[in-house]
Amino acid sequence: MSGAGTIRLGDLEVSRLGYGAMRITGSGIWGPPADPDGAVAVLRRAAALGVDFIDTADSYGPNVSEELIAKALAPYEGVVVATKAGLTRSGPGAWSPDGRPEHIRAALEGSLARLGVDRIDLYQFHRPDPAVPFAESLGAFVEAQQAGKIRHIGLSNVSVAQLEEALGICQIVSVQNRYSASDRDSQDVLDACTQRGIAFIPWYPLASGSLASGGEGALARIARAHDATPGQVALAWLLAVSPVMLPIPGTSSVAHLEENVAAATLQLSAAELDELSSAAREA
């Protein structure tokens, strides 16, 4: 994929615009999609367009997203598949943390089987569990890495303090927190990742909020100037904000996927980047 550049995840190098495979499941991220063949087509089109980083989790479905990825992309030639453990499901839209080491170990075995691999390239702790000491949960990841079942470890939904604690235990190659032009609560975590050269994977990267409200926000105005969509501008802004940014916009539509991938070639001026940043601070 041209335009976005690349980023390193330990000894792996991937393009800086990936694909998030949460939305290829059913409504509420629960059960199978209405069109499984369409989901497979989206995944294969992503790979054909040069997207070489696919992000998923055992809780998406649950299990459904990983199963579809295996059907579409195994044996994953030239594609890095990252998955996660640490959240359980009880129904559509219902998510509960489970950071017990025994759960992490069982979840890992399930993901290995569904993806059809002996080792997961990037295994992420989906969310810290307040009922389990953070280091205890992370210990299960380290144990699995030492056993050769995980290549690299990543974190998700963590604070700077938790990132620093984790770095005292093992190498962390990525952090995945919610972040967008209009939602920068994790700015301190992004800054910490930028300083350390750790990949930052923003989830919900296209939340435009008031920046594009009524078609007159900064995103909309800049999009018109580039004959682009507000979503493409939002992705271009993310890519410009930090060299460690690795957006993973997700979609169940081939057309929307192609639109997102095209954002990697969109170049915003310094003035436009400043306008978006200022508008977000004021929103």
Image (cartoon, helix red, strand yellow):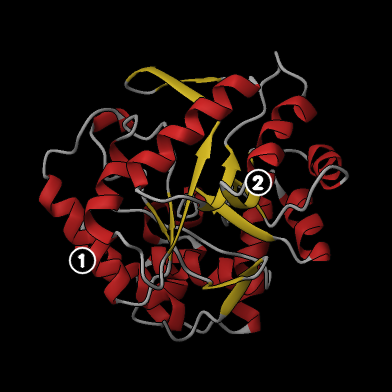
Describe the element under mark 1 as helix, strand or loop.
helix
Cα–Cα gap, marks 1 and 2: 38 Å
The furthest residue to the front: 147
The furthest residue to the right: 168
Describe the element under mark 2 as helix, strand or loop.
helix
Residue 99 visible in the current orientation: no
Q: How many marks?
A: 2
> Which marked residue is nearer to the observer: mark 1 or mark 2?
2
Toward the viewer: 160 or 78?
Answer: 78
Residue 74 location (% of width, % of height): 29, 59
What's under tag 2, amino acid-wise?
A: Gln
Q: Residue at x 34, y 29 (%)?
A: 62
Determine which of the numbered discs, if any, sits on residue 231 in the image. Answer: none
What's under tag 1, amino acid-wise?
A: Ala
Q: Residue at x 65, y 49 (%)?
A: 153
From the image, tell me which residue sits under label 1: 255
Residue 5 location (% of width, % of height): 55, 81
Is 266 placed above or below 52 here?
below
Structural crowding at the residue carrying mark 2, measured as other residues with C-alpha within 10 Å and reported as few (<14), some (14–19) or many (≥20): some
Toward the viewer: 271 or 268?
Answer: 268
From the image, tell me which residue sits under label 2: 145
Find out whether the residues at labels 1 and 2 contact each other: C-beta distance under 8 Å: no
Quarter of the image holding residue 35? top left
Task: Decide if residue 92 is on the left or right side of residue 135.
Answer: left
Residue 226 location (% of width, % of height): 40, 82
Q: Residue at x 58, y 55 (%)?
A: 201
Toward the viewer: 273 or 138?
Answer: 138
Quarter of the image holding residue 1? bottom left
Residue 116 location (% of width, % of height): 34, 48
